[in-house]
Image (cartoon, rainbow, N blue to C red):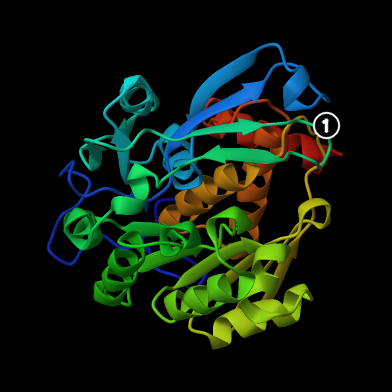
Amino acid sequence: MSARARSDCGVTARPAADGHDGGDRAAFEVVTVGRVGVDLYPEDIGVPLAQVRSFAKSLGGSPTNVAVAAARLGRRAAVVTKVGDDGFGSYVLSALADFGVDTRYVGTHPDLRTPITFCEIYPPDYFPLLFYREPTAPDMTIELADLEEPLATAQIFWTTCTGLSAEPSRSATLAALARRERQRTTILDLDYRPVFWASPAEAGRLAREALALVTVVVGNIEEVAVVVGDRRPADAAAALLDLGAELAVIKMGHRGVLARTAGGIVEVPPVKVNVLNGIGAGDAFGGALCHALLAGTDLPSSLAYANAAGAIVASRLACADAMPTADEIDHLLRRATDG
């Protein structure tokens, strides 16, 4: 990908206005905020948790996975989050460092435990999750002070709606978005998990509030419907733009991806793979999309690239550990083009 500063997507991924650039390690290209934890995914496929005999441990949490995906593609990435003062928290810090994600913004909560998430795997399209985040997760205790430095320096600032589901993370996230300069790329991942919300209506209301403050929104059609009440991709994307975004990206699974800007609609077809575990595919998509925006790639190529990254992870068991390299994405795209 070329390294032009201006993206043909209509969204600019620029260096910080204060002069930080690639020579300053504090000026990250991608900073994500929010959920982190440890995924325990069954090595027994197609059976309920009660019958699973062994699990594979890996780093997890959607925005954390996005940072890993961006780092795997060579981007300077960091995540703003918090873990517990426990063995799983130590594992998260070690895993992030191994993946090349900077940990300077990862705090440790003295009392709360690092979350864990269990999954059942029923390919190709059923992957129920069981979250252990009670009484609350450390990453939901993020405050505005935790966000101020990365907010000011990051070329791309990635947030999720999960961060809006409870205080103090909710107020901190909204305040941070309000402070972000409009000409800088700020992405909202709708990331709707019903278990974290009192109701879909509450989730939709807060997502709409955040949408007025960001430049890019990403979500699947179910998540988008919670926000705008419309499951028709083109119309739903238009509604997202009306709420404030400059680029709306809707992931449609086996139907591919649709994106909309003020200039029109772009659709790309799906990349066919044998799905093993669809969890994490959207995070690979997000990290690859950030990479493409930073490279200044045109919108159709950016979507195709992100789509291929997601497909690769869907064909693998884990999330963070499964994030693809640029060579793997390029190989899959060539294979898809060759038919």
Q: Residues within 10 Å of mark 1 (few under 14, many from 20)?
A: few
Residue 282 vs 326, above or below: the answer is below
Is residue 1 something that shows in the picture?
Answer: no
Q: Is residue 104 left or right of residue 231?
A: left
40 is higher (above) or lower (below) than 197:
above
Q: Quadrant of residue 72?
A: top left
Vertical comparison of 60 with 182: above or below: above
Q: Which residue lies under the disc numbered 1?
A: 274
Q: Residue at x 72, y 64 (%)?
A: 222
From this viewpoint, which residue is outermost toward the right?
339
Q: Position of residue 188 (x, y in %)?
A: 47, 64
Relative image position of residue 151 (x, y in whole percent): 24, 60
Q: How many numbered badges does the structure rendering display? A: 1
Which residue is at 72% across, 65% downward?
A: 221
> Going by the picture, which residue comes out furthest to the top?
53
Residue at the far bottom: name it: 242
Residue 147 in percent (x, y) is at 23, 57
Asked whether 162 or 326 is in front, the reply is 162
Q: Which residue is at a point 43% across and 82% down the rendered structure image?
A: 212
Q: Secondary structure at mark 1?
A: loop
Q: Is residue 149 above or below residue 224?
A: above
Horizontal arrangement in the rendering, residue 184 relative to residue 150 (left or right): right
Using the rendered image of the protein, determine whether residue 265 is visible from the camera's viewpoint.
yes
Amino acid at dot 1: Asn
Looking at this rendering, what residue extends furthest in the front direction? 135
> Residue 184 in the image: x percent, y percent?
32, 69
Tell me: 324 left or right of 293.
right
Q: Residue at x 66, y 77 (%)?
A: 237
Location of the C terminus (image quadrant): top right
